[in-house]
Image: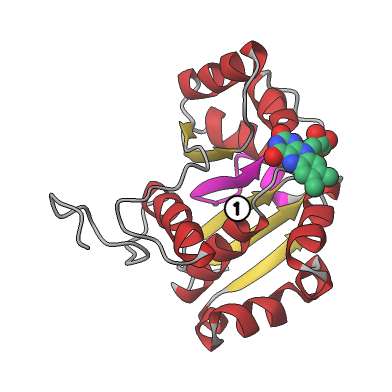
Amino acid sequence: MGDSRPSIAIGITGASGAVYATRTLAALLERGAHVELIVSDYGRRLLRDELGDAAAVERLMPYLTERYGAGVAAGTFTLHSNRDLGATLASGSHGCSGMAIVPCSMKTLAAIAHGLSRNLIDRAADVMLKERRRLVIVPRETPMSLPQLRNMVLCAEAGAMMLPAMPAFYQQPKTLDDLADFIAGKVLAALGFEHDLYPAWAGRVDH
Ligand SMILES: Cc1cc2nc3c(=O)[nH]c(=O)nc-3n(C[C@H](O)[C@H](O)[C@H](O)COP(=O)(O)O)c2cc1C
């Protein structure tokens, strides 16, 4: 209570691209944010499958420190169970100013599009929409079916920002981290944070 730091909810679901989630989390923590973290069952599996056991949810803070540096200690996070629909985040009275779901599976996208609220990620997203707060959805799938495309439109119509995991190449990325930085930077900007995760377009490609 009385904590004036920005509070942001992050949902991690079982779509490919765990590095987008860890980079986004680290960047928010580096900026002193308090993160309300929810990881679905397949999100947990994804962290381990794509990044190794060291990135398991229970070891996330040491992993982020090792991977992104001690600056992540500027922020804090609270881990919520995705099954806990009685968590503070499930209510519009919680002061969370925005939420990003990164990466977002087609299943969770469908649940948000149709207001199902069957788990805490779905419900917290629904709260963001009904309270007219920022909701950033980072879907990852290709190709996409017509229902998936329609679900993106439904979410956009409801006020969410659709921010597909589509890194650009004009900034001449050299590493996978450069690509992750690009998406994390887009998410931070959408949530209202300043960042320098990728250079602004300068009117031409620098070689
Ligand atoms: C390694 C792995 C990668 C996956 N990648 C994707 C993906 O890129 N996009 C997607 O929509 N689902 C993907 N899935 C399937 C989802 O994880 C699955 O539909 C799951 O039920 C999503 O549940 P959640 O949204 O609660 O995490 C993947 C599953 C696994 C195991």
Quarter where residue 15 is shown: top right
Give left or right: position of 10 versus 186.
right
Image: 16 above or below 30: above
Quadrant of picture, ligand 1: top right
* Magenta span includes 104: yes
Taking the image as drawn, is residue 89 in sight?
yes
Q: Which residue is mark 1?
A: 9
- Amino acid type indicated by mark 1: Ala
Q: Residue furthest toward the front? A: 207
Q: How far across and down, in percent of the image, does residue 40 sit?
A: 80, 47
Quarter where residue 202 is shown: bottom left
For the C terminus, the image quarter is bottom left
In this view, the residue in front, 13 or 140, is 140
Magenta part of the chain: 88-105
Q: How many marks?
A: 1
Q: How far across and down, in percent of the image, does residue 117 sit?
A: 75, 30
